[in-house]
Image: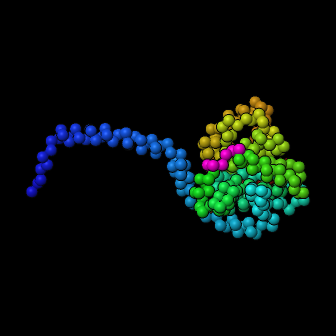
Amino acid sequence: MKIKFGIHKQSILIVAVALAAALAPLAISQQVTTATSPEEQRSKQQDGIIRADIPYAKDGWRADNLAQSPRKHEMVKVGARSAFVVYPTAEKAPVIVMMPEDQGLNNWSREMADTIAAMGAVVIVPDWLSGRGPNGGGHDSFPDVKSALMANYDVTQEMTTADQNAWADWGEKLPQYNGKLAVIGFGWGAGKAWAFAADRKDLAAAFIFYDWVPPGLDLTKLNADVYGFYASKDTRVERSIPTTKAAMEKLGRKYEYVDYKDAEHMFVRLAEMAADNNPANLYARNDSLARLQKLIEGLK
């Protein structure tokens, strides 16, 4: 037996139109809220970063490598600031302030600092989340990667430049310091290294791994020689290189870079991981670190 509803189609249409009209403002409001909520946008962005990083995230072996290093390394605290410091075996050495990727002072950045120290430099890695974590802690006090990444949004360029200046001042007081100061940055940290290079007058060199010049940065304030290490598949950064090159040439500033064919953003880290299947990343890592070592030799 079929049940027939005694409602005319025209009536249904009228009700539907009226209901749609009544709900439209609410729907638009919800869409605007969703589209313009900075916190939600940031959260989704970090979720995407974390998902992309899953194949490369297991790196406890880095801590094991660091434990076996012949070089002295320690956490140093000066006031509210903390940093990871690695000392080379040489009596005298340049000091390099290192700004890592946006994940901050993790296993990778500590091991990378040791790799650079092996080239003959004192390497200082500021923990820019010092005092900004749970209970006033730093990077290691956050319960997971996402919460540390989200905390980065409260860290301004002025804050990271101040951190770099404070640690550069500290490093220049070390008996091991040879009078040459440099900065190195990777990814997110490379943008902060650019800013520091435009602020610090006694900086000899800036080593920039795969990031662009922060918008609005005054390049006329640069005193340091700048050396870039780029990946051809890193399209966001690639688009910025011609503009940076033209600006540096106009200012008469030294800007030398290598653009590695078919390599990807973060190739220094990616190439070490079993999950990476791009041989261009391995070539870029090996060549860029060999180039970096030669440049550090020039600071001795």
The residue that appears at 25% across and 41% down in the rendered structure is: 16
The residue that appears at 41% across and 41% down in the rendered structure is: 29
In the rendered image, residue 15, in percent from the top left (x then y), is placed at: 23, 41
Is 157 magenta? The answer is yes
In the rendered image, residue 209, in percent from the top left (x then y), is placed at: 70, 48
Render colour scheme: rainbow
Q: Is residue 156 visible?
A: yes
> Overall secondary structure of the magenta stretch?
helix
Extreme-top residue of the structure: 250
Which stretch appears magenta? 153-158
The residue that appears at 71% across and 44% down in the rendered structure is: 158
Extreme-front residue of the structure: 135
In the rendered image, residue 99, in percent from the top left (x then y), is placed at: 72, 51
Is residue 87 shown left or right of residue 237? Answer: right
Is 215 magenta? The answer is no
275 is higher (above) or lower (below) than 182: below
The residue that appears at 81% across and 39% down in the rendered structure is: 223
81 is higher (above) or lower (below) than 26: below
